[in-house]
Image (tube, rainbow, N blue to C red):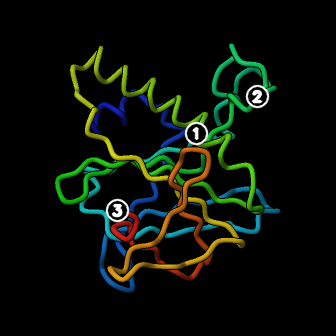
Amino acid sequence: MYDILRDIINNKAHLNNFHVSKHNNKNCLFIKENDPDAKCKYVDLVGFESSSTTFAFELDSKAIKCGHNTKLSPYFEDKKGLDKGNDGIIFTTIKDKNYVFICELKDSSKGHIAQFKSTSCFIDYLKSILKRFYKINTDDLIFKYIVFSKYGTTTKNTKGNYLSRNQEGFDVFNMKCCAKVEYYIKSFI
């Protein structure tokens, strides 16, 4: 699945940010916001099993244009947020389970639900492509939604996992955006 995703998603959208942490020698992936005015500019996610079972891309890539605009599709008007995308969509395998982490770096505490809705629709389309063209079953994908902002928290349960809360049908992790903190991806499962 990962090689097919690498092949069908436009190279300009790939997040080729996989690296090994200097602090703990673990596999990491960073998400970066390129807007110079952004307050949450960078997040490092740690603990991926392998680069071969991890693929990440951005759905709000400024490098991919539809006419003069950054849009997902020329078929949509911008009235309902249908063209919104997230900063990082990560397909990965952790402990033999397949996950999709949909991540957003946000300056405010609002606006991410419309992006999650739009990105989820796009992922449904990708799942359909994988099923119909490549005969890959994606029914087992587990979705996780994470917002990193200055309004977030880092509350954990007794097992050391971050806590999510339901927002319009999405279980969302609202995380504090700290550039110097490494967030362990397994803490979101």
Instruction: Tell me what residue is drawn at x 67 percent, y 67 percent.
Output: 149
* Mark 2, residue position: 80
Amino acid of disc 3 = Ile
Instruction: Tell me what residue is drawn at x 68 percent, y 36 percent.
Output: 84
Q: Give the mark, 3 or 2, whose residue is nearer the N terminus.
A: 2
Q: Secondary structure at mark 2?
A: loop
* Residue 146 percent across, percent down from the top left: 53, 58
Point out the image quarter for the N terminus.
top left
* Mark 1, residue position: 59
Q: Give the mark, 1 or 3, whose residue is nearer the N terminus.
A: 1
3D distance between C-alphas at marks 1 and 3: 22 Å
Residue 36 figure quarter = bottom right
Amino acid of disc 1 = Leu
* Mark 3, residue position: 189
* Residue 176 percent across, percent down from the top left: 62, 74
Q: Is residue 175 left or right of residue 76?
A: left
Q: Is residue 89 left or right of residue 35?
A: left
Instruction: Tell me what residue is drawn at x 44 percent, y 67 percent.
Output: 45
* Residue 132 percent across, percent down from the top left: 29, 14
| Labels 1 and 2 touching (C-beta < 8 A) | no
Above or below 61: residue 173:
below
Instruction: Tell me what residue is drawn at x 61 percent, y 45 percent.
Output: 168
